[in-house]
Amino acid sequence: MKIILSSNPYRDKGLRVALEARRVLEHAGAQTVMCLPFLPKKGDRLDLPRQLTLPQLDKELPTADLLICFGGDGTILHAARDATLYGVPVLGVNMGSVGFMAELERSELPLLAPLAHGIYSIEERMMLDIRVLRGDRLITQDTALNDAVISKGSMARVAEMEVLADRVKVTSITGDGVIVATPTGSTAYSMSAGGPIVEPTSKSIIVTPVCAHQLAARTMVLAPERVVTVQLPRGNRKYLYLSVDGGKAVRLTGGDRVEIGRSERTTQLVRLADRSFYQVIHQKLGGLNQ
């Protein structure tokens, strides 16, 4: 059993938590390798053990059985996207605040030992494929585990767009933007914008307006086979921005359309702790009725 330990060095100072996890796993008989989940920013001086070799994550994933990611939800999202390309299951250890996608907290590292013997379950999560089209030309494409957000950015103006499902108009939105989320992403930005909480293993596409300037604007939960298109008005000189899973924004212009549909890929999340979704909701968010 080859297990990659990938820790956010900005949250796990000196990679101390990851090193403790390595001791637990190797004592249980697992083979481990340590990698950083991303390249550090230029000029940053990180507190990393001098004697530790840190190979590139993409070089180790093809031969890995499992990836353990240490960080907040952003780090876990980033690592999950890479691991999904190679069909490698992911387990998250929370080093952030909420850590909704994490399976374990940093105080629960002894629970990792059964992984060395392949004792764990897999939970598959739906993903979304996103394509940006300018006329008939493909501008960019990406895959999301959480969401795709089309917004006006930081400028003090309203965004205008149409939302279609299978080329049939669903609604027009005037406001700050729109979020198209998976059930996994329903507890992220979509929830903060007033969207519903959806069980993460279900299959649906959630369309949530952001600060809409319309009384009738409502979140819609669509069937997973729908293709959602967010269309910018032609001739519109206002720029909007697309961000996938909180990543670098892509600038959109008038007439552009963003097509979003269910991906053939799924993210495999490792489950060890016997917690239901409702227990996690109560623990992380303070319950649904508080």
Image (cartoon, grey):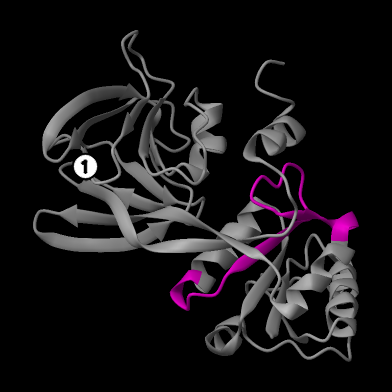
245 relative position to 42: left or right: left
Q: Is residue 97 magenta?
A: yes
User: With respect to residue 222, does 251 lie above or below?
Assistant: below
Instruction: Identify residue type, mark 1.
Output: Thr
Going 72% across and 59% down the picture, which residue do you hit? 272
Q: Quadrant of the N terminus?
A: bottom right
Q: Left or right of 10: which side holds 250? A: left
218 is higher (above) or lower (below) than 179: above
Q: Quadrant of residue 56?
A: bottom right
Identify the residue under disc 1. 229
Is residue 279 left or right of 150 when viewed as pictured?
A: right
* Residue at x-position 55% and y-position 83%: 58
* Residue 13: % across, % down: 87, 66
Give the position of the C terminus as an image quadrant.
Answer: top right
Q: Position of residue 12 (x, y in %)?
A: 83, 64
Q: Secondary structure at mark 1?
A: strand
Q: Reply above or below: 271 against 112.
A: above
Q: Say if the magenta span includes residue 134.
A: no
Q: Which residues are magenta?
A: 84-108
Q: Quadrant of the rendered structure where residue 16 is?
A: bottom right
